[in-house]
Amino acid sequence: MRKLRIILEMIKFEHSIFALPFAFMGAILGSFYVNGTWPTWGQVFWIVMAMVGARSAAMSLNRVIDKQFDVENPRTSMRAIPAGLIKEKEVIFFIVASFVLLFLAASQLNMLAVKLLPIAVFFLVFYSYTKRFTWACHLVLGIALGLAPLGGWVAVTGEINGISLLLFVSVALWSAGFDVIYACQDAEFDRERGLYSIPSYFGIPKALKVARIFHVFTIAGFITLFFLTSLTFWFGAGIIISALILVYEHSLVKPTDLSKLNTAFFTMNGVLSFVVFAFTFIDFIMR
């Protein structure tokens, strides 16, 4: 249990709140759009298990793959692996267990979920290597996190359509945007070590502009979703609040002042994902 607590702290398990609400959003939208009803409790349970397995495996893999850089980076040198709090083989065992949980969850949902697993696993693993050769690594992370709402949709419908892909792209751009902001704190280190990111390659001022552009397209995607579905005033209110949250998030981070970056990244993005899900939920409850 002590080792497990160390691993959960290492992967910031509590930050699952970033993606889990979007998975629930995808499940609710898909279930009503295709089936005309709420997801079953069984589907909700296995969606949660799939999300826990996927994120735990991805974050643990990232810590193992990046351990050589984590040792050198003052910001990450005290993480569990470089600090010697846990052995690499113990983390690998946890990764295998997490993937087993993901596979089990998918098998309990439907065949399309199982067939799409190799694609999901590819992006979960591939992301950790992308900083070695492309500044577009943020978009790869966006794709990985965008699979949360798409996976929720597939879990309850067994199909993919244009609406689900629009939701996927909107969340992917949101994720890529906040990852660009987060990467600003390591811009100098990444540049010195030959690692790629938008901040290290283009500079922090341009990176923050790119993040804003990504988030503008996120809100545009949600607005399009509003008009293409039967979503009502409640979801529209959620879009407005989400847009205001993003504006506030960007106001906290400036090229010359990154002191509030953690607030912008952790707090505000957790609030945003919950707000979008909550207003989607209320939208259907109020009918």
Image (cartoon, rainbow, N blue to C red):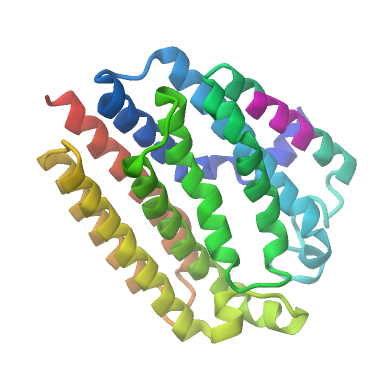
Dominant SS in magenta: helix
Q: Is residue 21 left or right of residue 204?
A: left
Magenta-drawn segment: 94-103
Q: Where does residue 50 sit, x and y in percent of width and height?
A: 57, 29
Relative vertical location of residue 227 with respect to residue 102 in this rendering, above or below: below
Q: Where does residue 197 sit, x and y in percent of width and height?
A: 61, 74
Q: Residue at x 71, y 35 (%)?
A: 5
Can residue 256 be seen by looking at this rendering? no
Q: Examine the image and state in which quarter residue 89 appears.
A: top right
Q: Quick check: is 85 in the magenta stretch?
A: no
Q: Residue at x 48, y 35 (%)?
A: 151
Q: Residue at x 30, y 25 (%)?
A: 34
Q: Examine the image and state in which quarter residue 68 appears.
A: bottom right
Q: Examine the image and state in which quarter residue 285 appears.
A: top left
Q: If the image is split into quadrants, where does the C terminus sit?
A: top left
Q: Where does residue 248 sit, x and y in percent of width and height?
A: 29, 66
Relative vertical location of residue 182 with respect to residue 34 in this rendering, above or below: below
Q: Residue at x 34, y 49 (%)?
A: 166
Foreground pick, 12 / 236: 236
Relative vertical location of residue 195 with respect to residue 141 in this rendering, above or below: below
Q: Is residue 179 left or right of residue 200?
A: left
Count of residue discs: 0
Q: If the image is split into quadrants, where does the N terminus sit?
A: top right
Foreground pick, 213 / 189: 213
Can residue 126 be seen by looking at this rendering? yes
Q: Quick check: is 97 in the magenta stretch?
A: yes
Q: Where does residue 279 sit, x and y in percent of width and height?
A: 23, 38
